[in-house]
Image (spheres, rainbow, N blue to C red):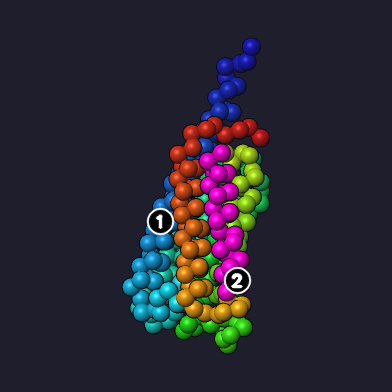
Amino acid sequence: MAEPGRSGPTTAPRAGSDVARRVAGSAAAGCALAGAVAVTFAVVAGPGPGLTGYVSEAGIAGSGHAATYRIGVLALAGALLLLGAALPPGVWAAAPALLASGAVFAAVSGAVTCSAGCPLPPFERATTADLVHGGASIAATASVVFAMLTLAVSVPAGPVVRRLAGVTATLTLPLCATVGLAMLVVGRGALAGVLERLVLALVVAWGVATATALALDRRPATPL
Protein backbone atom coordinates (compact mmCIF):
# COMPACT_ATOMS: atom_id res chain seq x y z
CA MET A 1 0.00 0.00 0.00
CA ALA A 2 1.39 3.40 -0.97
CA GLU A 3 2.18 5.81 1.80
CA PRO A 4 -0.28 8.73 1.83
CA GLY A 5 2.43 11.29 2.35
CA ARG A 6 4.33 10.29 -0.76
CA SER A 7 1.77 11.26 -3.42
CA GLY A 8 1.42 14.96 -2.56
CA PRO A 9 4.97 16.16 -3.28
CA THR A 10 5.01 14.28 -6.58
CA THR A 11 1.59 15.38 -7.81
CA ALA A 12 1.75 19.05 -6.78
CA PRO A 13 4.78 20.05 -8.90
CA ARG A 14 3.32 18.19 -11.88
CA ALA A 15 -0.02 20.00 -11.49
CA GLY A 16 1.80 23.30 -11.16
CA SER A 17 3.75 22.55 -14.32
CA ASP A 18 0.50 21.79 -16.18
CA VAL A 19 -0.96 25.12 -15.07
CA ALA A 20 2.19 26.98 -16.10
CA ARG A 21 2.05 25.44 -19.57
CA ARG A 22 -1.61 26.39 -19.98
CA VAL A 23 -0.82 29.95 -18.90
CA ALA A 24 2.04 30.05 -21.41
CA GLY A 25 -0.34 28.79 -24.11
CA SER A 26 -2.87 31.52 -23.30
CA ALA A 27 -0.15 34.18 -23.35
CA ALA A 28 1.19 32.82 -26.65
CA ALA A 29 -2.25 33.04 -28.26
CA GLY A 30 -2.68 36.60 -26.99
CA CYS A 31 0.74 37.72 -28.21
CA ALA A 32 0.21 36.11 -31.61
CA LEU A 33 -3.16 37.81 -32.04
CA ALA A 34 -1.85 41.19 -30.87
CA GLY A 35 1.21 40.92 -33.10
CA ALA A 36 -0.84 39.92 -36.14
CA VAL A 37 -3.25 42.83 -35.60
CA ALA A 38 -0.38 45.33 -35.23
CA VAL A 39 1.45 44.10 -38.35
CA THR A 40 -1.75 43.98 -40.40
CA PHE A 41 -2.64 47.51 -39.35
CA ALA A 42 0.82 48.77 -40.29
CA VAL A 43 0.65 47.06 -43.69
CA VAL A 44 -2.88 48.20 -44.53
CA ALA A 45 -2.63 51.74 -43.16
CA GLY A 46 0.89 52.41 -44.41
CA PRO A 47 1.85 53.94 -47.76
CA GLY A 48 3.26 50.67 -49.09
CA PRO A 49 2.73 49.29 -52.60
CA GLY A 50 -0.09 46.96 -51.56
CA LEU A 51 0.02 43.34 -52.68
CA THR A 52 2.94 43.96 -55.05
CA GLY A 53 5.36 44.57 -52.18
CA TYR A 54 6.64 42.71 -49.15
CA VAL A 55 5.04 42.87 -45.72
CA SER A 56 8.35 44.15 -44.32
CA GLU A 57 7.98 47.38 -46.27
CA ALA A 58 5.60 48.56 -43.56
CA GLY A 59 8.58 48.75 -41.21
CA ILE A 60 10.94 50.91 -43.25
CA ALA A 61 11.95 54.30 -41.88
CA GLY A 62 9.43 57.00 -42.72
CA SER A 63 6.55 54.60 -43.36
CA GLY A 64 4.47 56.26 -40.65
CA HIS A 65 3.67 52.99 -38.91
CA ALA A 66 7.16 51.53 -38.60
CA ALA A 67 6.99 51.43 -34.79
CA THR A 68 3.66 49.61 -34.87
CA TYR A 69 5.08 47.08 -37.32
CA ARG A 70 8.18 46.43 -35.21
CA ILE A 71 6.13 46.04 -32.02
CA GLY A 72 3.91 43.56 -33.84
CA VAL A 73 6.87 41.51 -35.04
CA LEU A 74 8.38 41.46 -31.56
CA ALA A 75 5.03 40.32 -30.15
CA LEU A 76 5.01 37.47 -32.66
CA ALA A 77 8.55 36.56 -31.61
CA GLY A 78 7.41 36.46 -27.99
CA ALA A 79 4.49 34.25 -29.00
CA LEU A 80 6.91 31.70 -30.47
CA LEU A 81 8.91 31.57 -27.23
CA LEU A 82 5.76 31.15 -25.16
CA LEU A 83 4.46 28.49 -27.52
CA GLY A 84 7.64 26.50 -27.03
CA ALA A 85 7.21 26.80 -23.26
CA ALA A 86 3.61 25.59 -23.52
CA LEU A 87 4.50 22.32 -25.25
CA PRO A 88 3.91 19.21 -23.13
CA PRO A 89 6.85 17.25 -21.75
CA GLY A 90 8.12 14.44 -23.91
CA VAL A 91 7.82 16.20 -27.28
CA TRP A 92 10.90 16.05 -29.44
CA ALA A 93 13.39 18.61 -28.16
CA ALA A 94 13.81 19.93 -31.69
CA ALA A 95 10.32 21.49 -31.58
CA PRO A 96 10.87 24.01 -28.75
CA ALA A 97 14.41 24.62 -30.03
CA LEU A 98 13.10 25.47 -33.50
CA LEU A 99 10.43 27.74 -32.04
CA ALA A 100 13.06 29.52 -29.95
CA SER A 101 15.26 29.92 -33.04
CA GLY A 102 12.28 31.28 -34.95
CA ALA A 103 11.68 33.80 -32.14
CA VAL A 104 15.29 35.00 -32.30
CA PHE A 105 15.22 35.33 -36.09
CA ALA A 106 11.86 37.13 -35.95
CA ALA A 107 13.26 39.58 -33.38
CA VAL A 108 16.25 40.27 -35.63
CA SER A 109 13.89 40.78 -38.56
CA GLY A 110 11.91 43.33 -36.56
CA ALA A 111 14.99 45.10 -35.21
CA VAL A 112 16.91 45.40 -38.51
CA THR A 113 15.04 47.61 -40.96
CA CYS A 114 15.31 47.06 -44.69
CA SER A 115 15.64 49.97 -47.12
CA ALA A 116 12.83 51.26 -49.33
CA GLY A 117 11.29 48.41 -51.28
CA CYS A 118 13.18 45.80 -49.22
CA PRO A 119 15.33 44.90 -52.24
CA LEU A 120 16.76 41.40 -52.53
CA PRO A 121 19.01 39.73 -55.09
CA PRO A 122 19.18 38.63 -57.85
CA PHE A 123 17.10 41.40 -59.46
CA GLU A 124 17.83 44.26 -57.06
CA ARG A 125 20.88 45.65 -55.32
CA ALA A 126 20.56 45.03 -51.60
CA THR A 127 22.31 46.65 -48.66
CA THR A 128 23.76 44.69 -45.75
CA ALA A 129 20.68 45.57 -43.69
CA ASP A 130 18.43 44.28 -46.48
CA LEU A 131 20.27 40.96 -46.53
CA VAL A 132 20.21 40.62 -42.74
CA HIS A 133 16.52 41.49 -42.58
CA GLY A 134 15.57 39.23 -45.48
CA GLY A 135 17.70 36.34 -44.24
CA ALA A 136 16.29 36.60 -40.72
CA SER A 137 12.71 36.71 -42.02
CA ILE A 138 13.25 33.62 -44.17
CA ALA A 139 15.02 31.78 -41.33
CA ALA A 140 12.20 32.62 -38.90
CA THR A 141 9.55 31.24 -41.24
CA ALA A 142 11.61 28.14 -42.00
CA SER A 143 12.17 27.46 -38.28
CA VAL A 144 8.46 27.59 -37.57
CA VAL A 145 7.59 25.33 -40.50
CA PHE A 146 10.19 22.78 -39.40
CA ALA A 147 8.77 23.00 -35.87
CA MET A 148 5.37 22.11 -37.34
CA LEU A 149 6.84 19.07 -39.06
CA THR A 150 8.49 17.98 -35.81
CA LEU A 151 5.29 18.35 -33.81
CA ALA A 152 3.30 16.49 -36.46
CA VAL A 153 5.26 13.31 -35.71
CA SER A 154 5.74 13.82 -31.96
CA VAL A 155 3.17 11.64 -30.17
CA PRO A 156 3.39 13.40 -26.75
CA ALA A 157 2.22 16.63 -28.40
CA GLY A 158 -1.29 15.20 -28.48
CA PRO A 159 -3.67 14.50 -31.38
CA VAL A 160 -4.98 18.06 -31.76
CA VAL A 161 -1.54 19.70 -31.85
CA ARG A 162 -0.22 17.01 -34.19
CA ARG A 163 -3.17 17.42 -36.56
CA LEU A 164 -2.87 21.21 -36.62
CA ALA A 165 0.86 20.95 -37.32
CA GLY A 166 0.47 18.33 -40.04
CA VAL A 167 -2.29 20.12 -41.93
CA THR A 168 -0.63 23.53 -41.74
CA ALA A 169 2.77 22.18 -42.77
CA THR A 170 1.16 20.41 -45.74
CA LEU A 171 -0.37 23.70 -46.87
CA THR A 172 2.62 25.90 -46.07
CA LEU A 173 5.53 23.92 -47.51
CA PRO A 174 4.50 24.17 -51.19
CA LEU A 175 3.68 27.85 -50.73
CA CYS A 176 7.11 28.51 -49.23
CA ALA A 177 8.77 26.72 -52.14
CA THR A 178 6.72 28.75 -54.61
CA VAL A 179 7.61 32.03 -52.86
CA GLY A 180 11.31 31.17 -53.03
CA LEU A 181 11.05 30.25 -56.70
CA ALA A 182 9.09 33.42 -57.48
CA MET A 183 11.73 35.59 -55.77
CA LEU A 184 14.49 33.93 -57.80
CA VAL A 185 12.70 33.82 -61.18
CA VAL A 186 10.27 36.76 -61.15
CA GLY A 187 11.47 39.00 -58.33
CA ARG A 188 9.43 41.50 -56.37
CA GLY A 189 5.84 41.72 -57.55
CA ALA A 190 2.24 40.67 -57.02
CA LEU A 191 3.00 36.93 -57.13
CA ALA A 192 5.63 37.02 -54.39
CA GLY A 193 3.63 39.55 -52.39
CA VAL A 194 0.39 37.55 -52.35
CA LEU A 195 2.13 34.24 -51.65
CA GLU A 196 4.16 35.77 -48.82
CA ARG A 197 0.98 37.00 -47.18
CA LEU A 198 -0.64 33.57 -47.50
CA VAL A 199 2.36 31.92 -45.85
CA LEU A 200 2.42 34.40 -42.99
CA ALA A 201 -1.35 34.12 -42.48
CA LEU A 202 -1.08 30.33 -42.24
CA VAL A 203 1.83 30.53 -39.79
CA VAL A 204 0.04 33.00 -37.54
CA ALA A 205 -3.23 31.04 -37.69
CA TRP A 206 -1.33 27.88 -36.74
CA GLY A 207 0.34 29.67 -33.84
CA VAL A 208 -2.95 30.98 -32.46
CA ALA A 209 -4.78 27.66 -32.92
CA THR A 210 -1.96 25.59 -31.40
CA ALA A 211 -1.47 27.95 -28.47
CA THR A 212 -5.22 27.89 -27.79
CA ALA A 213 -5.29 24.09 -27.96
CA LEU A 214 -2.42 23.89 -25.47
CA ALA A 215 -4.09 26.41 -23.17
CA LEU A 216 -7.26 24.30 -23.13
CA ASP A 217 -5.47 20.96 -22.80
CA ARG A 218 -6.45 19.39 -19.49
CA ARG A 219 -4.58 16.14 -19.95
CA PRO A 220 -2.19 15.43 -17.07
CA ALA A 221 1.46 15.50 -17.93
CA THR A 222 2.94 12.11 -18.67
CA PRO A 223 5.71 11.29 -16.16
CA LEU A 224 9.13 11.22 -17.79
Mark 1 near mark 2, Cβ–Cβ under 8 Å?
no
**x then y, percent, for residue 197:** 47, 66
How busy is the neighbourhood of tag 1: few (under 14 within 10 Å), some, or many (20 plus)?
some
Residue 125 vs 43, above or below: the answer is below
Q: Which residues are magenta?
A: 159-182
**x then y, percent, for residue 201:** 46, 60
- The answer to which of marks 1 and 2 sits earlier in the sequence is 1
**Three-letter residue code for mark 2:** Gly
**x then y, percent, for residue 27:** 44, 50
Q: Residue at x 66, y 35 (%)?
A: 224
Q: Quadrant of residue 157?
A: top right
Whether residue 36 can be seen here? yes
Residue labelled with disc 2: 180
Q: Residue at x 52, y 32 (%)?
A: 219
Where disc 2 sits, the SS reads helix
**Three-letter residue code for mark 1:** Leu
Residue 174 drawn in magenta? yes
Q: Residue furthest left?
A: 45
Q: Residue at x 44, y 70 (%)?
A: 70
Split into 4 quadrants, where in the image is the N terminus? top right
Whether residue 67 can be seen here? no
How busy is the neighbourhood of tag 2: few (under 14 within 10 Å), some, or many (20 plus)?
some
Q: Which mark is residue 182?
A: none
Q: Marks 1 and 2: which is nearer the front? A: 2
- Decide if residue 16 is on the left or right side of residue 156: left
Q: Quadrant of residue 63?
A: bottom left
Residue labelled with disc 1: 33
